[in-house]
Amino acid sequence: MFKRNYPSTFISPLHPDSVRVNLIAAQLLPAVQRGLDIKKRHAIESKKQGSKSCGSQPQIAHLDGLDWEVFVMKNDGHAGAVSWSNGKILVFTGLLNRLETDAEIAAVLAHEIAHLVARHWSELIIYKKWCPYPLKVYFVRRLEIEADRMGMLIMAAAGFDPRIAPVAAEKLVGNDIYHPSGKKRARLLSRAKVMDEALELYREVMSAKAPETHSATGA
């Protein structure tokens, strides 16, 4: 619909901005499974040691066959991104103007991927159709917070420092009524339990990459 109604606003796939976001997405998508695998292994080890398991792991079979694509749309006034259940992610140039590093952009793209992993689209249909306005806002904001946390784990599994996620969140202020404020999102992501989980995942991924880098340099 966007491409049909606003064809002149879509940036070419060969434009540096398009290439950049697609390269970042290409690192994030394989990390979805990697992150879940690592978390699952930790849960099994904890169970063997007598610790309480953290519960069942999210399933991602519904992502099979999705034709993932990331598009960039010219709109300097909108610092955001949006995803659809078919695997399409739209990034607005206003977001790229506000965020400086690849890790910050990765935090936003991972958030959008997390919406699809968690099947938030199906919940949104219910909330927006059946819930009265105050409840609708409450439930949709809860989904956004869940996507923030899951997205931080995805970016950590891809080798992006999760400590950047709160930084990126705080820059995304005043999106709309359905998103908590940037400061609140940053505060929730910085909470010790949430951040510690992401940092543990990030360090494990980076530790696994270190021997590969060492071998590649021939040292």
Image: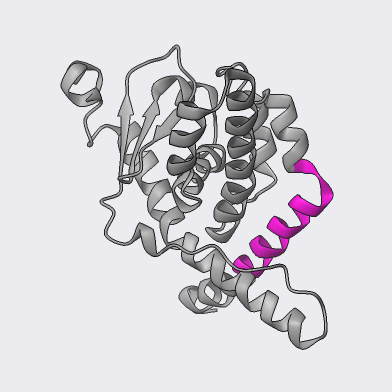
The reply to whether residue 179 is visible in this rendering is no
- Looking at the image, which residue sits at the far top? 77
- The answer to which image quadrant residue 168 occupies is top right
- Which quarter of the image is occupied by the C terminus? bottom right
> How many numbered marks have been drawn onto this rendered protein structure?
0
- Secondary structure mostly taken by the magenta-highlighted segment of the chain: helix
Indicate the position of residue 10 as horizontal and vertical percent values: 24, 24
Of 100 and 47, the residue lying toward us: 47
- The answer to which image quadrant residue 20 occupies is top left
- Give yes or no for residue 191 being in the magenta stretch: yes
Indicate the position of residue 99 as horizontal and vertical percent values: 54, 28
Taking the image as shown, residue 110 lies to the left or right of residue 48, namely left
Vertical position of residue 64 compared to residue 114: above or below: below
Residue visible at 74% across and 28% down? Answer: 184
Taking the image as shown, residue 42 lies to the left or right of residue 160, namely right
Taking the image as shown, residue 119 lies to the left or right of residue 45, namely left
Taking the image as shown, residue 122 lies to the left or right of residue 41, namely left
Of 139 and 108, the residue lying toward us: 139
Vertical position of residue 27 compared to residue 16: above or below: below
Q: How is the image coloured?
A: one colour
- Looking at the image, which residue sits at the far bottom? 48
Residue visible at 40% across and 48% down? Answer: 25
- Give yes or no for residue 175 being in the magenta stretch: no
Residue visible at 67% across and 81% down? Answer: 44
Q: Which residues are magenta?
A: 190-206
Residue visible at 75% across and 82% down? Answer: 47
- Which quarter of the image is occupied by the N terminus? top left
Indicate the position of residue 104 as horizontal and vertical percent values: 56, 37
The reply to whether residue 199 is visible in this rendering is yes
Vertical position of residue 129 compared to residue 118: above or below: above
